[in-house]
Image (cartoon, rainbow, N blue to C red):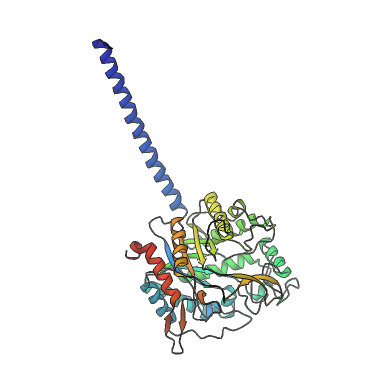
Amino acid sequence: MLVFTLDQMRSISLTRDVISFKLVLLVVILSLLLTYSFILNSFILNSHGQQTDQIFYGVNMKGYHTSMPQARTIGSIMPANYFDDSFKLISEAGMNHVRFVFYWESYERDPSNFMLELQSVAQAADKYNVNVIYDNHQFHTSSWFNPQRGTGFPSFLFQDNPAYPAGNGGGTKYAPAKAWWTDWWNRAVKDTNGTDGWTLQAEFLKKIVGTLDSHKSTLGYEILSEPQVHNVDQWEKIGKFNTFMVNELRKLTSKVLIYSMNIPIDLKSPINLIPENLAKMKPQNSTNIVFKISIYGLPTESSYQQQKFNTFLQASNITGVPIYVGEWNNVLREQTVNEEGSSVFEINPFESDITQEQANLFVKTFKDLGIWGLAYWKWDFVSLDTPNFNLISVGDNGEITTNKYYRQLKIALESNFGNQQNQ
């Protein structure tokens, strides 16, 4: 049997007190460190524009004058009350966001009606409390290169250079497009006065900001949707371009500015599409900046879409810039010959579709990953070949009718953001 003297017992008691004190002190220090870490992380996220208490969710939308190409005319007529009726339906579905698509060449075609249409969008968004990102869009570079479907950059950036022949393909596979984008990143595309394209685009976007920035519904602006990359040396050049645009626009606005992923998104491409290169596109001034991506297929385990999504997430982790899924839907692609005579993987409109289960899983995946926002592709008064690429139809009397995809999206958002929708 152990027997302790009084002094030994006092020593043991003191030792226990010291140990207890040290444990308490350790717990306090750890708590302070965790608190500091939380505050620091919150500060970092907020400094990059991520709003941790709100996710923006809604749809992409197109207009008429803001989407009119220079090389052709949109046949469908937009109803007189289209924007008011659309934003009302979007708001009633519990959505809080629209990514509004516009094109630079549409402005050059009809500046007055272009700006009036943007004002109508902003007024309707103000009325129904919907947050709008205004997206400087391009598809196949320009209607100069692709008169059938392309829209984007204005013709004056092409027409005086024999290296950019009209109608010779604006997609990523075509030599004229590769030449033009290479010159664009080298800041060698100029107008007849010798002013370079970066400066001209900044002047155009400043007009957009000057028209829209005072509206409470204006959430921010996207610099350029899905620019083309054709060489590994162009990643840093895009970063310089984005830095230039952010610095110019910051002279007029403190609202969100968005830079976009590139195309082509080919994980085996010689352009070396890796997170480290995607991170080079980040502008130097990253305050209130967001990184936009597009997802057109469920990122299921071991799928190409998952690999692509993981690449974007890793790039976001490197830069600290939050992700915005600016376009999402579900499509089936198959190899075909497009209107430009090239063999490509294009959307099969008859096989593409999205179910309620898939819509739910898309939104849940995005929410669980903590994305900044998401916008379904899309809301359009023009009827489309791919049914799930439109949430509405417009009757001869101008009345908007929502379809099953609208209802699917509404249910998917309600099931994931129910509490936020009621706020």
Q: Image height check: is 115 above or below 290?
A: below
- Check the picture and name the quadrant holding the N terminus: top left
Q: Position of residue 112 (x, y in %)?
A: 52, 80
Residue at 59 percent across and 74 percent down: it is 348
Residue at 64 percent across and 67 percent down: it is 197
Q: Nearer the viewer, residue 101 or 293?
A: 293
Q: Image height check: is 128 above or below 13?
A: below
Where residue 188 sits, quadrant-wise, is bottom right
- Check the picture and name the quadrant holding the C terminus: bottom left
Label count reads 0
Q: Is residue 251 visible?
A: no
Q: Position of residue 29 (x, y in %)?
A: 37, 34
Q: Position of residue 18 (x, y in %)?
A: 31, 22
Residue at 40 percent across and 45 percent down: it is 38
Q: Position of residue 343 (x, y in %)?
A: 70, 71
Q: Nearer the viewer, residue 45 or 407?
A: 407
Q: Is residue 321 visible?
A: yes
Q: Is residue 175 left or right of residue 393?
A: right
